[in-house]
Image (tube, rainbow, N blue to C red):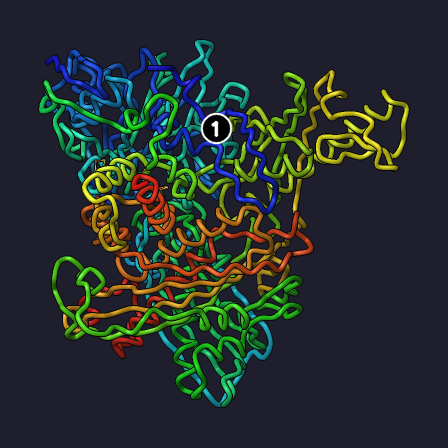
Amino acid sequence: MTSTETRTVPTTASGEGGRLGDSPLRPDGTLKVTGEFAYSSDLWHDDMVWGVTLRSPHPHARIRSIDVTDALRVPGVSAVLTAADVPGENAIGLEHLDTPALADGVVRYQGEPVALVAADHPETARRAAKRVVVDYEVLPAVTDPRRALDADAPLVHASREDNLVRAMKIRRGDPAPTAPVVVALDFEVGMQDQAFLGPESGLAVPDGEGGVDLYVATQWLHVDQTQVCRVLGLPPERVRLTLAGVGGAFGGREDLSMHVHACLLALHTGKPVKMSYARDESFFGHVHRHPAWLRYEFGASEEGELVYAKADILFDGGAYASSTGAVVGNGGTLGLGPYRIPSVHVDARGVYTNNPPCGAMRGFGCVQAAFAHEALMDELADRVGVDRVEIRARNGMREGDLNITGQVIDSAAPVAELIRTVRDLPLPPEPVGERDIRELPGGASNTTHGEGVVRGIGYAVTYKNVGFSEGFDDYSTARVRLEAVAGEPVATVHTAAAEVGQGLITIEQQICRTELGVDQVVVHPKDTSVGSGGSTSASRQTYVTGGAVKAACEAVRTSVLRRAAEALQRTGLRLDGDKIVAESGEVVAGLADVLDEPVEETVEWRHRPTFPIDPETGQGNAHVQYAFSAHRAVVDVDTELGLVKVVALDTAQDVGRALNPDAVVGQIQGGSAQGMGLALMEEIVVTDGHVKNPSFTDYLIPTILDMPPMQVKVLEYADPHAPYGVRGVGEPPTISSGPAVAAAVRAATGKALRRVPIRPEHITF
Amino acid sequence: MRIELTVNGTRREADDVWEGESLLYALRERLGLPGSKNACEQGECGSCTVYLDGTPVCSCLVAAGQAQGREVTTVEGLREGDELDPVQQAFVEKGAVQCGFCTPGFLMSTKDLLQRNPNPSDPEIREALAGNLCRCTGYEKILDAVRAAAAVTQR
Ligand code: FES
Ligand code: FES
């Protein structure tokens, strides 16, 4: 087999010239269908050994001692490491350095890494890990987040005063508002998993000089590098990261998994170390979507116009903070949905518990809130006798409105148009006569031929921030090189922005082709030899890294034209396709003719700044851009068995401008499926801090049989503040799809259903 | 132990295979064929699908020793020379590939379906591919690809 150096992401030049607005094929598509694309779990090195992780069986325990003697004696084992072997600072974390790379004296959740083993075969390593003797003293655990702030709750982190990660307040308008119509509800959202298919994995290769090269699947190479360096006690130039093929991410690769562990083992053994989690370990190896408890109240006029809204939102952050603070920020600032509300009172909190750590997942804090505000919007509509679509149109944000933090929505906010658009899409035909059982709830299990089956329709809208918020310095770096190869101009684009399947590399090529008039664009492997691209999250890469690539291309173009002007002694030159033309339109040279020397420019690009919100009032310009979407779900429910079949899941979304229309639709379809999954089936069941279903046998994600056909309507209201007018695309579909499905099940059953995922027993009892 | 088998038409052998190793592990780690994927290694996702004597199986559930003397076809064996199989071509062209981790398994299942049923209806496609999980696409473009591949193979 080839070594890692040749099995990394593709550097193939694509001659197929898709410009912005086209849908060219992905440059990695052929490699992915032939099996040649090297994912992080495919990496291989001649003399590599395998690393495995020993994890805590307890949600909370003190480690009295660890004895590795027996494990080290197993033939084939080359290293067994514990916290005592960490050379640098044993602390990682995205927002707080509260997470040990290896447990140091105490474990705070079931599955926390305690020791590492390297051996010549993964099974040898696993068996040796079982021989590590850890003497635990089990401690009382806090596993109900609603009790986590009680005075007598055990402290998850003894160094802290309480179990609070972050509390956010938003106060706006009348502090004691009243309204003729008041509706309220409590809602609960279960713990969802990203369930990306490519396991956490990678290869760490020691360089023989005390440094290491790490090939890994991640969402943000540079933030990983910083964290790995801290634990290894090494400067960044000695810890180089390259993005290996990523098998999906969805937020679950924002935090470190095996990164530090593989590097520790590699530096200790002097050998390349491969780690690859099995699926059960993956459920312990990354953070999940926060479960949430939400209490909402809307006050409205008799006509259903919102007068005030109150919300109390509690997120279970689990044992370590991860990105809980930012999730609380989103839940607070966006948690009332895309509506105009004069008076607002929101409290959002995230707490530590001894449950699995929770952090980023697609939709990030807005997903949980949307289930509550959309259920309550339906309740308000019914109470005042207004249609459920029209009540959303009536209260929906419009451009120029203020949101609940007092920020002006300064580009399109087509809430009314989106919800009416999905309403007007064709409905699936009403069921008549004998039906194919595969189209019924229960499907091929043959549980009904239509008896007891009731149809329901539900609607939901959402909005989501794009990019990092609350004053974060959110930038991306792009390096673009233009040179002549065999007489043809060829561009190379180099960013560290992670391609996780969404198609960023295709967009990077399209931007270069459009800006530089070239056909051939090579995508350089993503690595830390160029500046940070920021995170592949918050629907931000087309906007921010796209903006950086655009700016780098512009800088290259300027340099090329300056060079041409000097060489040709002409002024007023411009680039037209791959020709250099004078003001008159006369072609004075081909682009390749002036590229005797390559031109290369590197640009760091930032979007408009955001600002922290006021700690007392929650007011401020926290976000840079908002993205809006709406869904309509049609479901058939077997009311006797509680089984649900989603018959249609249709959506409309404003994407600003679709740079690659096919990829945009693909994002919307995939995102919609994940939201539907949370509404109906996806939950990590945690009992007393123990995960009960860490497998695809027991944690269900939608299959092709579960998914209905989806009509996707894309609106393009360009955002004048964003490069090319783009608006982030990836997350909104995951937010509005689930609440629409839940609403449809409520409509079919007449049940309140104040919890997701909705299980059969919630429908039948 | 030593195993001998035919993979993608070529006689292969592997030494020092531990009895507990899956065919998937042997293919990926011993025979240099990592195209078959390891998304669950518990028979739930279909990403490891290969043909064993022409029949699709989850290679994570087959012991390497069970493949002794038998014929295995993996995703690496789908194309002829430089020419992509029509199923591969359709997946690329229809945008059915995002992260692509599920793709090898879908390709193997789709090709098997089209061999048995060259003109499948949508419910038949859904039923045939129900054992393959995809987390990225929501399956719509996978359906598009299967329909397109069926149209091409029928020509
Ligand atoms: S890896 Fe074999 S079925 Fe998932
Ligand atoms: S394309 Fe990512 S799992 Fe299917």
Asked where in the image residue A188 lies, by quadrant, the reply is: bottom left
Q: Which residue is mark 1?
A: A230
Mark 1 chain: A
Residue found 33% across the figure and 25% down from its top: A42
Quadrant position of ligand 1: top left
**A63 or A244, nearer to the observer:** A244
Q: Residue furthest front?
A: B155
Q: Position of residue A355 (x, y in %)?
A: 29, 50
Closest to the observer, A284 or A751 = A751
Q: Quadrant of the C terminus of chain B?
A: top left
User: In the shown orientation, is residue A148 left or right of residue A485?
Assistant: left
Classify residue A444 as left or right of residue A231. left
How packed is label 1: few (under 14 Cα within 10 Å), some, or many (20 or more)? Answer: some
Q: Which of the image's four quarters has the N terminus of chain B? A: top left
User: As shown in the figure, which amino acid type bears the numbered disc 1?
Assistant: Arg
**Element under label 1?**
helix
Q: Quadrant of residue A340?
A: bottom right
**Residue at image location 35% in from the left, 21% down from the top:** B81
In this picture, is A591 found above or below A723? above
Residue extending farthest to the top is: A208
Q: Is residue A662 left or right of residue A676?
A: right
Q: Nearer the viewer, residue A610 or B60?
A: B60
Q: How many marks?
A: 1
Quadrant in which residue A213 is drawn: top left
**Res. A281 visible in picture:** no
In this view, B92 is above or below A293: above
Task: Point out residue A356 in the picture as x, y percentages from the top left corner.
Answer: 31, 47
Q: Position of residue A713 (x, y in %)?
A: 49, 61
Q: Tell me if the residue at label 1 has its CB under 8 Å from ligand 2.
A: no
- Whether residue A194 is visible: yes
Q: Position of residue A665 (x, y in %)?
A: 46, 52
